[in-house]
Image: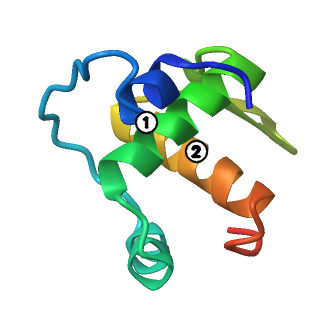
Amino acid sequence: MQPTAALSRILGIEKKNRVSSSVRIEKEFLDIFSEQKLEKSDTMNISVQRFCNIYGVPVLLVALEPDGARVRPLDMSDVINLSLSDMLQSKGMMKGF
């Protein structure tokens, strides 16, 4: 795994710089956190860092439909849900969502 701010801070190499934030995540992700005994903040930070490293910072979601494209701006909860889904699927912790 490449070095990241999230990983360096989780390992105690750097001081954590976390702030409280209110986001809404899908219930399925909370179920996986519980089943796998994952720490929520660490898991979300790692998934967002990983997602941004791979795909860049997402700002829009584009859906191609028969009658044209639908574009929707993403909020913080959307980014976290996309990130968690991508990481948990890649680790085999969840099937398609």
Which image quarter: residue 14?
top left
Q: Distance between the residues labelled 1 and 2?
A: 13 Å
Asked if residue 43 shows in the view, the reply is yes
On the rendered structure, is 60 left or right of 29?
Answer: right
- The local crowd at label 2, few if under 14, some if 14 to 19, many if 20 or more residues have their Cα within 10 Å, is some
On the rendered structure, is 96 left or right of 27?
Answer: right
Q: Nearer the viewer, residue 56 or 14?
A: 14
Q: Give the residue displayed 55% in from the left and 26% down from the top.
A: 49
SS of the residue at dot 2?
helix
Q: Give the residue displayed 43% in from the left and 65% down from the top.
A: 38
Q: Is residue 31 above or below residue 29?
A: below
Give how far across and how far down residue 84 sits, in percent. Answer: 55, 51
Q: In this view, does 11 lie above or below 87?
A: above
Which residue, as the protein is rendered here, is positioned at the far left?
Answer: 20
Give how far across and how far down residue 53 sits, in percent. Answer: 69, 19
Give how far across and how far down residue 10 sits, in percent. Answer: 39, 35
Which residue, as the protein is rendered here, is positioned at the far front?
Answer: 13
Q: In this view, does 12 lie above or below 59?
A: below
Image disc number at residue 19? none
Q: Give the residue displayed 64% in from the left and 31% down from the top.
A: 50
Which residue, as the protein is rendered here, is positioned at the far bottom?
Answer: 35
Quadrant housing the N terminus: top right
- The local crowd at label 1, few if under 14, some if 14 to 19, many if 20 or more residues have their Cα within 10 Å, is some
Q: What residue type is labelled 1?
A: Asn
Give how far across and how far down residue 54 sits, in percent. Answer: 76, 24
Quadrant housing the C terminus: bottom right
Residue topped by disc 1: 45
- The total number of labels drawn is 2
Residue topped by disc 2: 82
Q: Earlier in the sequence, mark 1 or mark 2?
A: 1
Mark 1 and 2 residues: CB-CB less than 8 Å, in contact?
Answer: no
Q: Is residue 54 above or below residue 33?
A: above
